[in-house]
Image: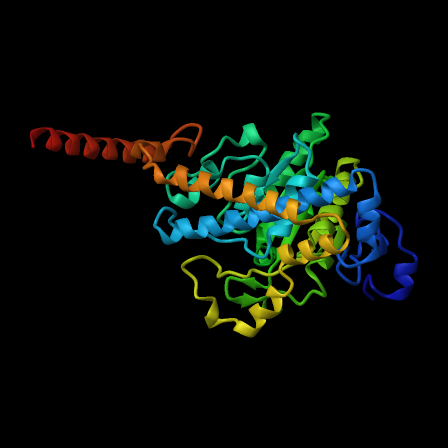
Amino acid sequence: MTVLDHDLAAAWTPDAHGPRRDPAPLLPDSEPVRILGTPALRRTADSPGGRELLRDLHRRLVVGRRFNQQATTLTKQGRLAVYPASTGQEACQIAVASALRPGDWLFPSYRDTLAVVSRGVDPLQTLTLLRGNAHCGYDPYEHQVAPLSTPLATQAPHAVGLAHAARLRGESTVALALVGDGGTSEGDFHEALNFAGVLNAPVVFLVQNNGYAISVPLAKQSAAPTLAHKAVGYGIQGRLVDGNDAVAVHTVLSEAVEHARTGRGPVLVEAVTYRLEAHTNADDAGRYRSAAEVERWQARDPLTLMERHLREAGVIGDADVAEAAAEAEELADRMRTLFHVKPQLDPMSLFAHVYAEPTPQLREQAAQLAAELAAEAATEERR
């Protein structure tokens, strides 16, 4: 006899084995939530502040696309060491900033630079890691934005820990962790969701499912019906949304954040989207996906999709589009100016902020580097 046998299941009572829960309220929608092109768009536009929200989301998309383009250009010019563009995923990135309150925390991955900039961090500071100048270019406590995480999903347990600690202090803080579809295969992702469910932590996980973990398609990563279904196994709610529909992503994320903030538990949101560019500038995406596939997704570009539907609904016009484009060009021009200045780097800063108390090995390495720098300086003086 097993615990799944009918008779035993019927006689089940909560004890040390844990309670049994009805999974139905946790299950995601059968289809991704969409608003653009549906009657829900008109309801959003007619709601108090709805038109202003839609115009703001459109403006953020336009600026975000230009940010990706300019950062990619900076990489080609050698001003960035590497850039993992979020082109095609901007709807997910900008919705994060619009769904969070000022006191909430964002835990980004390496591809989420646009989300960080949308949160108010300076572009130069945001891209410092990808420039190769420092581990992090901004003060996380000033912006409530954790450092960009290059290892997959390691930021997710940190988000849970911060959210739980904030709740213990009586704060209303929500933490939002950004993860890619590849990150859901990592142990850190499992541990984060498990702790979040057990602790009922006020945390939201946004999985940007762009179809590939570098070159590995989703079908070879997971056999789950959707990645949002993974939430059920941890006792938390799963939501599925069209990641190319900026209004839908904003709506679902805003609901998830308030769900977590009001003590109703964590939420896992899967946004179905697509990475139009290569994994990074060092990647050849043509080796693992076809041009026809990319072309199909370009037809669902989040920027053109939103602009078309908002124009049809009479929410934006030529003046709004021109104003957003002008703001985007101002950002691009500022980025070019910032990155034109050669940074003054201190090699000894490599050893700062690694440990609160430097280890003997770090102290030894720092002393060795200091000696080498001093020798180089002495040589230059003699010349």
Q: Indicate the position of residue 18 as horizontal and vertical percent values.
A: 80, 48
Q: Quadrant of the N terminus?
A: bottom right
Q: Indicate the position of residue 82 as horizontal and vertical percent values.
A: 41, 51
Within the image, what quadrant is residue 298 found in?
bottom right
Q: Indicate the position of residue 85 as horizontal and vertical percent values.
A: 50, 53
- The answer to which of 139 and 161 lies nearer the viewer is 139
In the drawing, does residue 235 fall left or right of residue 332? Answer: right
Q: Residue at x 68, y 54 (%)?
A: 306
**Is 379 above or below relative to 317?**
above
Q: Quadrant of the C terminus?
A: top left
Do we see residue 192 in this rendering? no
Q: Residue at x 92, y 57 (%)?
A: 11
**Is 35 above or below relative to 327?**
below
- The answer to which of 153 and 280 lies nearer the viewer is 280
Q: Indicate the position of residue 347 as horizontal and vertical percent values.
A: 30, 34
Do we see residue 105 in this rendering? yes
**Is 298 above or below relative to 133?**
below
Q: Residue furthest left?
A: 383
Q: Residue furthest top?
A: 169
- The answer to which of 213 and 342 lies nearer the viewer is 342
